[in-house]
Structures are given as structure tokens and as C-alpha cells.
Amino acid sequence: MARRAKKEWARAIVRCLLALDASLVAAFALAQDAPAVGLQPDVTFSEYSPLSSDSEIVRRSLSPLAMAEARRVLARSGKTLSGQSIDLSEEKFAVYVPPQAPPRGYALLVFVPPWQNARLPQGWASVLDQYGVIFVSAARSGNDENILGRREPLALIAAQNIIHRYAVDPGRIYIGGFSGGSRVALRIALSYPDVFRGALLNAGSDPIGAGGITPPSKELFLQFQNSTRLVYVTGDEDLGHLGMAAVSMRSMQEWCVFDVDAEVTARAGHEVAGPAALSRALEALLNPIQPDPDKLAACRSVYEADVTAELQQAQTLIAGGRRDDAQNLLMEINRRFGGLAAPRAVEMQSELDQSAR
């Protein structure tokens, strides 16, 4: 009996070991499948976004007359826009993922740098942990790189891959940057309000309209006004960029973009936001304010009337044979109103081109 009991005991131990081994294998496989957390340098991505294709970037980012001219040039040359300008096999990204995912999913900050290397700014990790924000930034996306050919598509591709790897709240996806990268971030926010719900603008910004960023199509611009939160973060000793921020914010008010916050950092020059400034900025970014619909409608009616009046003036000049004056006015309309003047501005430009032949 003792020998039989011993054998049964041995068999039980073997079964336990086998079960333990199986559970370890399963846990290892789960760990292999689970997305990594913490700081990950030199990450490679493999998934392209349809939003980062050359044709989509041109459609969203160029003014109507510039886009029409680009199409004519391509047609004459027999060329077409290539699918994607980025070869992902050659690109690297820095990713930081907080170890604890918030109940509603991570927030995401896609960061456009002015520098060439992909890195997480010093002191940011603990703040990202506090707010549950994933950070991603591309290498070779600095101020010397082409905006439409590299900086914009890299940011869009980064967002696409992080969203598919992690549980990200689609209502808390943001674009940001520092200095020249911040100015690019604002352009991306304006062109892609269906992707990014806000922008963290650290010491770099531009106005909308003539001399600044051309408004996109009416559809995109209405979405930008309705759902985009802009947070400006500037050092109090960075006088040049404080001035740029003031001009940009005043322009936003004139163009009916009301969900705007400004954070001024004491005793700071032209430098990337420190942990305390980042914390205040993220707090502001994560708490948007819904614009008053009546105020928004009244504001929109002002620039819509301006667009209609200037297009009518251009049409009158064309009808009167004043071709040069009409051309100059159309160019000004294009610079100031961009996609808000489409498709009528493009039609009048075509009319002028045909009359010149």
C-alpha cells in the first residue's frame, strides 16, 4: 500500500509540474504578445496609414489653387503622386508607454521635434505616467526635413501604428511639438482634425490666413473649430515666441477657434517644456471646452460673407476684362481663405487660364 501511495504521489507531482510548465508557457506567450511598456528607443513600424499618402496630404494641406496647379504640372509630365513618400524599413521612432493603462484607454501625444534624433524630453516620463499618455516621436523629422514629404507623414504613420498596438482613446489623440516642430504640429492639427483632438504648441505657432497657414476645406475647418483644443506653452523669457503665440491666438479668435489655452512658464527661455509645464499643458489639453454654438455660428457668418463678397468682386473683374486685377485678387483670396473659397476660386482660375490662351 505504501508503495502504491508513493507512486500515486509521484504521478500527482508530475501532473502538477506539467500543469505548471503549461501555465508558464502560456504566460510567456502572453508576455510575447503583450505590447511593451516604458521607454523604447529605435522602434520600427510596418503599417502605413491611408491618411499619410501623398495624394491625401496634398489634398488636405495645399491651398486650392496650389493643388490645382500641382495637378496640372503632374498631368503635363505624365506623372502621378506616389502612394507613400516614406520607406518605413528605414525609419526609427522613440516610444514611451506608461506602465498602467487608464480605464478608458491611453491618451496619445505624437511629437514633432525640431531636432533629428528620436528621443523623449528629459523629465517627461513621470508626467506621462501621471496622465496615462503614450509619447511617440520620429527620427529624421527635424526642421531641416521636408514638411509634406517627411514630417507630416511620419507623424500620421506614428499615430496609426500606436493606435493599432495599444488601447488608445480616440477622443484623446493629440499632436504636439517644440519650436519649428510646434509650427508643423499646428499645420497637422488644422489638416487632420478628424485624427487629432488637440495640439500642444510648445514655443512655436503661426496665424491662420494671409501670411500664415492656409485654411483647409470647409468640412475640415468646421471640424477643427468644433473639436480641436489648442494649448500654447511658452517661456516668459522667450519674447519672440511669446509674440508669435499672441499673434496666433488672436488669429484663432478671428477665425472662430475658441477652445484655446495659454500656459506661460516662469523663468524659462526658448526651451522644451519642463515636467511642471508639461503637466499643466496636459491638464489643459485633456479638459477641452465645448465652444458656444451661437457664438460660433455668428463668427462664421462674418468670414463666410467676406468670402462671398471677394469671390463676387473677382467675378466682376473677370467679366469686365480686367484679367490682371482678377488674377491678383484670386491669389489674395487663395492665401487668405484657402479651402473656404473652393471650388469657386478654382473655377475662376480655370476661366482666367482659358482666356489667356
Image (cartoon, rainbow, N blue to C red):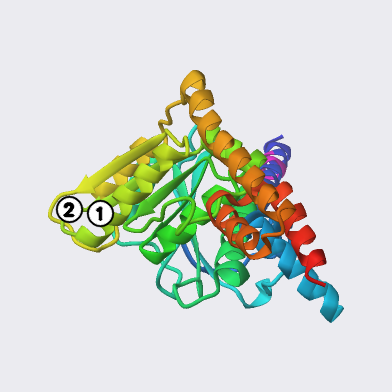
* Relative image position of residue 121 (x, y in whole percent): 34, 62
Range drawn in magenta:
9-14
Tell me if residue 192 comes above or below residue 44 in the rendering: above
Residue neighbourhood size for the residue with mark 1, other residues' Cα within 10 Å, grouped as few (<14), some (14–19), many (≥20): many
- Left or right: 286 as drawn, with respect to 173: left
Kindly identify which numbered label has been placed on residue 236. 2
Q: Residue at x 17, y 53 (%)?
A: 236
Q: Residue at x 55, y 45 (%)?
A: 196
- Left or right: 356 as drawn, with respect to 263: right
What residue occupies the far bottom of the structure in this picture? 77
Residues at marks 2 and 1, CA–CA distance in whole angstroms: 7 Å
Tell which of 76 and 351 is nearer to you: 351
* Relative image position of residue 8 (x, y in whole percent): 72, 39
Q: Quadrant of residue 60?
A: bottom right
What residue occupies the far front of the structure in this picture? 320
**Of discs 2 and 1, which sits in the foreground?**
1
Tell me if residue 226 comes above or below residue 349 in the rendering: above
Cβ–Cβ under 8 Å for marks 2 and 1: yes
Residue neighbourhood size for the residue with mark 2, other residues' Cα within 10 Å, grouped as few (<14), some (14–19), many (≥20): some
Kind of residue at disc 1: Leu
Tell which of 170 and 302 is nearer to you: 302
Kindly identify which numbered label has been placed on residue 272. none
Residue pointed to by mark 1: 242
Kind of residue at disc 2: Asp
Tell me if residue 152 comes above or below residue 190 in the rendering: below
What residue occupies the far right of the structure in this picture? 78
- Indicate whether residue 271 is drawn in magenta: no
Badge 1 marks a residue whose secondary structure is helix
